[in-house]
Image (spheres, helix red, strand yellow):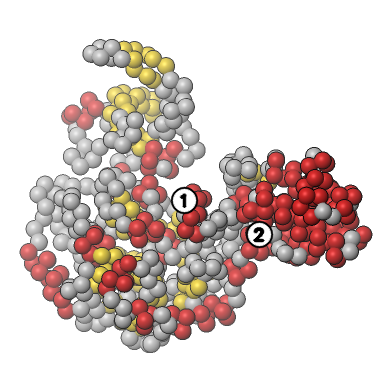
Amino acid sequence: FFWFTNIYVRERFHMKTFRTSNGTTTLLLQLLITNISYRHVTAENREVGLDGTLLDDKTSDETIPASKNASTESENEQCGLYLAQSSIPNAGLGIYTGVHVPKGKRLGNPDVCVVITDVENDVIYEYSWHPYDIGAEFEAESVSGLCTGLGMAVNSHSGLNNVENEFPLIDSAGLHRYTHPGAGAITYYHNVEARATTDVPAGSEVFISYGEQWFVEREAELGPIPLQIDYALTDHVSEAIELYLDDYGHQTSEESKEHVMKLVRTIITDLMPKVSSLLPEKMEDVSEVLAAGSARYSAPDSIRSLDWLQTNGYCIDNMKAGPSTIPDAGRGAFATRRIQEGALVSGSPLLRFERDKLVTNSVFSEQLVLNYCFGHPQSTLLLFPYAPLVGLINHNSKSPNVEIRWSTKEENNEISIWTKRSYNRLVKASKVPLMIEYVAKREIQPGEEIFLDYGAEWEAAWKEHVQNWTPPADSKDYVMATTFAKLMEDQPIRTGGEQEEDPYPENLITACYYDYEESYEQYADAEDEEDHLPIFMQVWEETDLLFTCHHHLRPCLILTRGEEEDGETFYTAEMYNLPDTT
């Protein structure tokens, strides 16, 4: 090891000073050991290995008291969420919190997800969530979930992720397909809450985990992005440098310190280039890395001043969801505070879609997302706003209280250029920096529903739909699975024999949670009578996340039901695989 250190130094720098410095040798040994074997503890006290896997998957149950700043009841309180330029270079916009949010508390107000089915689209792919994350995997063969607000406008930073989205509620907002012409015109995936996974100081940019594979897959496009383990290793290297300074700094000249730091960065660059990119140029700056943590040090603007946010950002927590006052509209957006005439209710970035590329070959050829887009009848260009809750602003031509306009902020001065460009340039661009603003036409009171005039053509089309609407065939007895589950939550699951006498609704099937792993031990229990092939059996096991992940659901038939001595109900079930599994 000493031989490697000395040879490496001599070959790269030809400086005997480094070979003979005991302090430098100690430092290099610490750094090289870091590369060979290392375990660190994250801010959540969870040990992580070099490959980024959790070695001790135990989370803290500590409850942090709520902050008084988190109140949203007063019309004059500090804005809770801002949309502003992200602290990540070239990442566009991001979301910041305007108040301190304790760990476990909610950020902003619950939002919705809009499902897109059986469409391959690069824009959708970049902004959507996996159907398992929202419980939409049974909607179609291919499903994407566009979760507005903190599901789409939030960036990801492997070292600073501080929120996670919870599973949505799924219901039709009281619109039954047999009695309401608006059923099916709205998304059923709602009440998506974002919770803080750590204490989030006021002014912090909000980050959510995309999964580190997201960055690995895009390295050719984005370049090498540090992952969680890289930040952990950088912290460890910085600690080693700080230890060197404590022991030998008083004996080392500033020139020698500069040479040592250059040597360290050279070695680290060869071994761990992402870590090298996170280290400071000067040794005296290492203390700042340790004080802030390498992740925060690498993104110094990830905590902004409230003055900066108020000047450069949009307040985006002026609305919350609730049952609309308009029949057949389902849910609506309501003011959380008094909003003065001419004030901004929200600002929203826009995704652009091509209408003709949202058509599928399935029975349902039109996508639900069309109901959430702005467009022109003579153009195939569609614009989808995705700021929090703007998709719940309903139509009212008689008394609208907001109107929309292009963004007027100076940092969005490219909008005037983009709005004059041709359709072809718009649809071919990888990113289009278009933004709109929702402006109060008059004073809006807290709790008042927000309305926008969609236009005369939209209103005429809706009236025609209502006038000609007839209930779908066999829809009278339809019941959503989530609704039925609530009705039957105190009842045992019926066996196959019981369902012959008392069947479930035709649109429902029984499904069982089952975590299938090929590595589980299998054994041949019997032979299939026709093909004489062995039948493999596996023991059903309950895991930590079994009942929280929809991708563990498998269609099943309940064979028998029994009761344990302690009163717990147990079942014997015949499990079936999903079509795309083995």
Q: In the rendered view, tell whether residue 259 sits above or below residue 99.
A: above
Residue 30 is left or right of residue 54, and the answer is right
**Residue 292 spot, x, y in % from top left:** 69, 63
Q: Which residue is mark 2?
A: 278
**Residue 413 spot, x, y in % from top left:** 43, 82
How packed mark 2 is, by other alpha carbons closer than 10 Å (few <14, some 14-19, many 20 or more), is many
**Residue 387 spot, x, y in % from top left:** 39, 69
Q: Between residue 458 and residue 518, name the one nearer to us.
A: 518
Indicate the quadrant where residue 4 lies: top right
Q: What's the distance in space between the residues labelled 1 and 2, CA to CA?
A: 21 Å
Disc 1 is placed on an element classified as: helix
Mark closer to the chain start, 1 or 2: 1
Question: What residue lies at 9% left-to-right and 49% top-to-bottom?
Answer: 473
Indicate the quadrant where residue 421 lies: bottom left
Disc 2 is placed on an element classified as: helix
Going by the numbered disc 2, the residue's amino acid type is Leu
Question: What residue lies at 27% left-to-right and 31% top-to-bottom?
Answer: 494
Question: What residue lies at 57% left-to-right and 80% top-to-bottom?
Answer: 307
Q: Between residue 214 and residue 169, name the one nearer to us.
A: 214
Q: Which residue is mark 1?
A: 217
Q: Is residue 210 visible?
A: no
